[in-house]
Amino acid sequence: MGEDKTRQIDLVLSTPLPLTLHPAAVYLSSLSPTSRRTMEKALNVIARLLTSNQCDAMSLDWSKLRYQHTAAIRAIFIEQYSPATTNRMLCAMRRVLEESLRLGFISAQDYQYAINLKSVRGDSGLPGRLIKPEEITSLLRNCHQDNVIGIRDAALIGILSSCGLRRSEVVALEMDDFNCEDNSLTVRQGKGGKSRRVYLPPGVVAILNDWLKIRGKSSGALICPVKRGGHIHIQHLTDQAVMAICQKRAASAGIKPFSPHDFRRTFITRLLESGIDVLTVSQLAGHVNLATTQKYDLRGEAAKRKAVECLNFLYENFF
């Protein structure tokens, strides 16, 4: 017991490091704001597990981690988290150890041993659900019962549901990203820093134009905060604000709770249901790998059954 506690104390930084020399800080600074929050939480979980809640990601001495530590963390994660979550958190740990190597805090041999962990396999599936068309209609009707905030929320829901954007992408949209000539949006802050163009259906264009009549055509954030009295601040919403808006509207419209990412799942699934090829869907979703797009396919067994029915013509005249 005393020896374990001593080992835990050894993992705590004796003196704080400058952010430019801190492996975790250097790694986190390379990420987008959304990814940074997610990975920082993962690193904090790892730090607390290794030190019995004595420190967080910024006070842990990552250079002291060895294979026995990383293997123990992997074993704990397998019991507590899904394969996808486990692999994401292990990735964060590996990346911090990589920065420790680059900064000269850990030897190449110790680094290689520490990261020599197999990825966790398993079909964890995607959480969330499909949002029904009638539910989207209920949400938009609920929005139009309000004034300025409702019109803003309707524009946000319209973009999320018709373009399948990530939260970080929709809040990063600028006025200049909307092209009224072809009704497109340019997503400049996509995952991995990649840009793409998506297109709005006519109904959503009408909703967005209603918002722009109130917001104005000045440059800056496309979807903005609305303060008391209907005063619009031309600045970007936060990711958390988008989640709060979805939660508020679901409760107010009397529909089952959903997350902003459920719009993305629904967008991808509905396109595949409509017969759009997976490559086009992948491009619209901003996925680099087609396999990622296929993971979002929530069509289920009905789609498989319908696909097989297409082969029935081979047997129609058999009997």
Image (cartoon, rainbow, N blue to C red):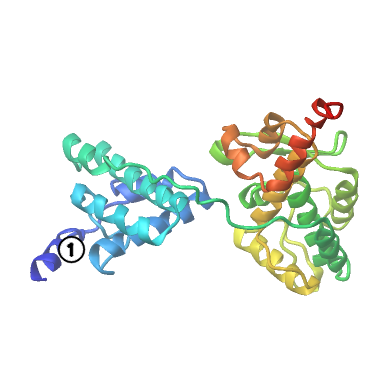
**Vertical position of residue 315 compared to residue 246: above or below:** above
Residue at position x 84%, y 51% in the image: 208
Q: Position of residue 248 (x, y in %)?
A: 72, 71
Left or right: where does residue 122 sit relative to residue 149?
left
Can you tell which quarter of the image residue 1 is in? bottom left
Q: Position of residue 78 (x, y in %)?
A: 36, 55
**Vertical position of residue 116 compared to residue 319: above or below:** below
Q: Is residue 44 visible?
A: no
Residue at position x 85%, y 38% in the image: 183
Can you tell which quarter of the image residue 249 is in? bottom right
Q: Position of residue 181 (x, y in %)?
A: 88, 34
Left or right: where does residue 76 sit relative to residue 157?
left
**Vertical position of residue 21 compared to residue 146: above or below:** above
In this view of the protein, which residue sits in the foreground, 38 or 296?
Answer: 296
Q: Is residue 34 visible?
A: yes
Residue at position x 83%, y 48% in the image: 217
Q: Position of residue 44 (x, y in %)?
A: 36, 60
Residue at numbered disc 1: 8
Left or right: where does residue 220 sit relative to residue 190?
right
Extreme-left residue of the structure: 3
- Callout 1 amino acid: Gln
In this view of the protein, which residue sits in the foreground, 228 or 168?
Answer: 168
In this view of the protein, which residue sits in the foreground, 186 or 297?
Answer: 297
